[in-house]
Image (cartoon, rainbow, N blue to C red):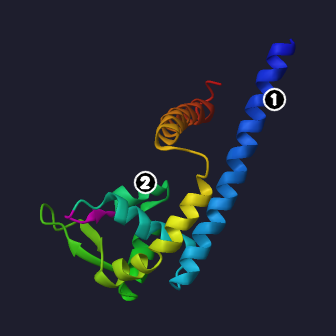
Amino acid sequence: MAEKQKIDRAVRDFIWNIVEIHSQIEEIHKSWAELLGLTEPQWLILMAIDELDEGHGVSGISVAGKLRIHPPFVTNQTKKLEEMEFLAREPSLEDARFIQMSLTEKARAEIAKLSIKREALNSTLLDGLDEASLDYLNKRLASIARNSRLASQKLSIGVL
């Protein structure tokens, strides 16, 4: 019984650590967004597009999937970002019914202005972790993320 209690305690500690990390990263995202006159969701959309774009633009569905948010919300916010000249929205070359989005030069320039601060922040955030440790941690977290999605699905259909 003592071993089960230790594991339960470790799981609870892990979950609370994730909650704390999420909260702090959310505050960091809010700060970055405010520096550009954006909301936190708009900042995250820009970051997702920057991450996903391989030179041909990114679909709203891809952004919604990356951020785990509803596609209509992405559409609404990307229209606002386009009005602010942070995004270009163009019909897809493969299927004009779909929109491909990419960062504008203005967005890239504004994000670049933050790069020194972002590098310093990342250094503080990951202090004590070398590349190998970070790679190991990322692999484990990716596994936990996959397992948590599976657990959530099982819970929603009543299997757990």
Which residue is labeled 1 in the image? 9
For the residue marked with disc 2, what is the amino acid?
A: Lys
Q: Is residue 146 visible?
A: yes
Q: Is residue 112 magenta?
A: no
Q: Secondary structure at mark 2?
A: helix
Above or below for 20 versus 153: below
Q: Secondary structure at mark 1?
A: helix
Residue at point 81%, 14% (across, down): 3
Query: For residue 2, what is the image quadrant?
Result: top right
Residue at point 50%, 83% (across, down): 36
Residue at point 43%, 66% (across, down): 47
- Say which quadrant the C terminus sits in: top right
For the residue marked with disc 1, what is the amino acid?
A: Arg
Q: Is residue 25 left or right of residue 14?
A: left
- Say which quadrant the N terminus sits in: top right
Residue extending furthest right?
A: 2
Which residue is labeled 2 in the image? 66
Q: Which residues are magenta?
A: 55-59
Dominant SS in magenta = loop
Place of residue 61 in the rendered image (x, y in percent of width and height, measured from the top left): 35, 58
Place of residue 64 in the rendered image (x, y in percent of width and height, measured from the top left): 42, 58
Residue at point 41%, 70% (across, down): 46
Question: Which label belongs to residue 147?
Answer: none
